[in-house]
Image: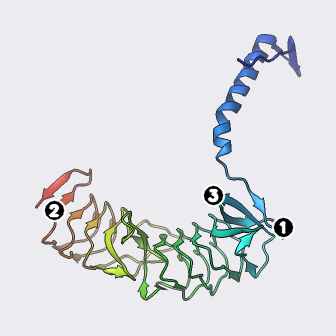
Amino acid sequence: MLKVKCPKILTVGKLGITNSMSQAMIRIIILLSFLTLPFASKVAAQYVDGKGQLTYKLIGNDAIITGCFNICPDPLPIPSNVNGIAVKGIGTSAFENELLANVTIPNGVTAIKSRAFANNRFTDIKFPDSLKTVGTAAFSSNRLSSVSLPGSVVSIGKQAFFDNELTELVVGSSTTHISYGLNDDKQTLTVTGCIASCPSNLIIPSKINQFFITKVADQAFYKISNPAFPIIPITSVVFGDGVTHIRAVSFRGQMLTSISLPNSVVAIGNGAFNGDMLSNVKFSQSLISIESANGKLISEF
């Protein structure tokens, strides 16, 4: 046990603290410091590039840009390496609220994290062919009217381009307005929502580039009221062949009046269409189960 020698009496103002009290307090402080050390060691250290311009952290052998050391320059040139370390990503909220108009993203960057460039003034961005993922709201609240992403992108976060001047974008050879992520099998996709505001007539395609869409995620198109950004309700949806699962509350609160499910659908999650205005539903011939609002199976075909 670590022993600490304490003075007999400590005085702060008019408050006297006895020897036993001070020892107890110090032991508590020492104990807390040991308990918090493992957590502190997990926090990635921040570094500054050789120009004294950008900050970054290390993830393995890769550099993730985390922001500007001082005032961001505009145009903002993001280097392909910092201090000899390859730049692989742009961190969460790295350049949020910087009011930038121009940025250069180098080839080699594979990930742009959530809100990395939110609330700036971009009207056009060229994305590198190395890019694989774009995080939630990564480019929200900008002035983009068109976006073309490389076919290498396998994940686009929900509302990645919300509050811009576009409703759809080009990804490789596909045009889409949905956000999506790569499934564990690395061969299929799950739809997670829309890249901006959803169109009233929603189309979920069979595939994006070479990846087939098999699932609609929990709460993917769940309508949440936001007075600051009125959302157009979805009144119709077309599912591409190949969708097998429609997860919980995925279309809750929309204004669907009828749906026709492709024969590939085998399961519908609890409350998937709760709060809609459905009067006509054509079920899939392959449908196996529908869950109730509490997650219990209510139908098995």
Which disc, if any, is residue 60?
A: 3
- Secondary structure beneath dot 1 equals loop
Asked if residue 96 shows in the view, the reply is: no
When asked about the image quadrant of residue 127, the answer is bottom right
User: Who comes first in sequence, dot 2 or dot 3?
Assistant: 3
When asked about the image quadrant of residue 36, the answer is top right
Q: Give left or right: position of 4 versus 102.
A: right
Q: Amino acid at mark 1?
A: Gly
Relative image position of residue 263 (x, y in whole percent): 17, 75
Which disc, if any, is residue 52?
A: 1
Labels 2 and 3 touching (C-beta < 8 A): no
In the displayed structure, would residue 194 be above or below residue 174? above
- Mark 1 or 3, closer to the camera: 3
Tell me which residue sits at (28%, 79%) in the image: 240
Q: CA distance from mark 1 to mark 2?
A: 60 Å
Name the foreground residue: 172 vs 195.
172
Residue corresponding to mark 2: 288
When asked about the image quadrant of residue 98, the answer is bottom right
Q: CA distance from mark 1 to mark 3?
A: 22 Å
Q: Amino acid at mark 2?
A: Ile
In the displayed structure, would residue 147 be above or below residue 136? below
Tell me which residue sits at (76%, 14%) in the image: 21
Tell me which residue sits at (37%, 76%) in the image: 233
Q: Amino acid at mark 3?
A: Gly
Relative image position of residue 64 (x, y in whole percent): 66, 64
Specify the farthest residue to the left.
301
User: Who comes first in sequence, dot 1 or dot 2?
Assistant: 1
Relative image position of residue 111 (x, y in whole percent): 57, 70
- Secondary structure beneath dot 3 equals loop
Name the foreground residue: 12 vs 147.
147
Image quarter hosting the N terminus = top right
- Secondary structure beneath dot 2 equals loop
